[in-house]
Amino acid sequence: PYVMVCNHQASLDLMCMVEIMPDRCVPIAKKELMYMGTVGWACWLCGIIFINRKKTGDAIDVIAQTARTMRHENVR
């Protein structure tokens, strides 16, 4: 397993990054993208994990749960 960190500057950059990422790779995005109309729907349907950057504890919980799921299901 590995973590790829990208600092995208626009919401459309995320879609381009998803295209070049390896199979079985799930991106994590800021929760604000979920509320951006069509882009938010597309991200949600693609299985992107959203984190709330304003609530650090919630963001850590989401990432920790994702890591536990990865270890439990033995996925990358």
Image (cartoon, helix red, strand yellow):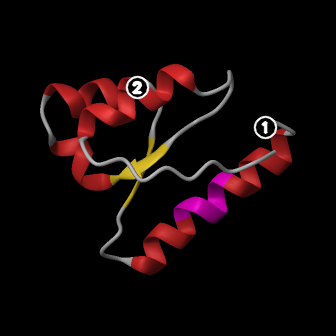
Residue 48, can we see it? Answer: yes
- Look at the image and say whether residue 53 sits in the magenta stretch: no
The disc placed on residue 42 is none
Give 69 or 20, whichever is nearer the viewer. 20
At mark 2, the secondary structure is helix
Give the percent coordinates (x, y) of residue 53. 35, 69
Give coordinates of residue 65: x percent, y percent: 64, 59
Please state which amino acid type lies under the numbered disc 1.
Arg
Q: x%, y% of residue 14? A: 37, 35
Q: Residue at x 28, y 48 (%)?
A: 9
The image shows residue 3 at horizontal and vertical percentages of 68, 51
Report the magenta stretch's main SS.
helix
Q: Which mark is residue 16?
A: 2
- The residue that appears at 33% across and 34% down in the rendered structure is 13
Quadrant of image for the N terminus: top right
Q: Which residue is mark 1?
A: 76
Precedes in sequence: disc 2 or disc 1? 2
Q: Residues within 10 Å of mark 2 (few under 14, many from 20)?
A: few
Q: Quadrant of residue 43?
A: top left
Horizontal side of residue 10 vs 44, given as left or right: left
Task: From the image, state whether disc 2 or disc 1 is nearer to you.
Answer: 2
Q: Is residue 30 above or below residue 53?
A: above
**Left or right of 60 on screen, residue 65:** right
- Pick the front one: 26 or 8: 8
Residue at 23% over, 53% down: 32
- Position of residue 63 relative to residue 50, above or below, is below
Q: Please give left or right for residue 39 compared with residue 55 in the image.
A: left
Q: Amino acid at mark 2?
A: Cys
What span is colored magenta in the figure?
A: 62-66
Q: In the structure shown, which secondary structural element does the residue marked by tag 1 occupy?
A: loop
Of the pair 43 and 62, the residue shown nearer to us: 43
Please indicate, yes or no, whether residue 44 appears anywhere in the rendered image.
no
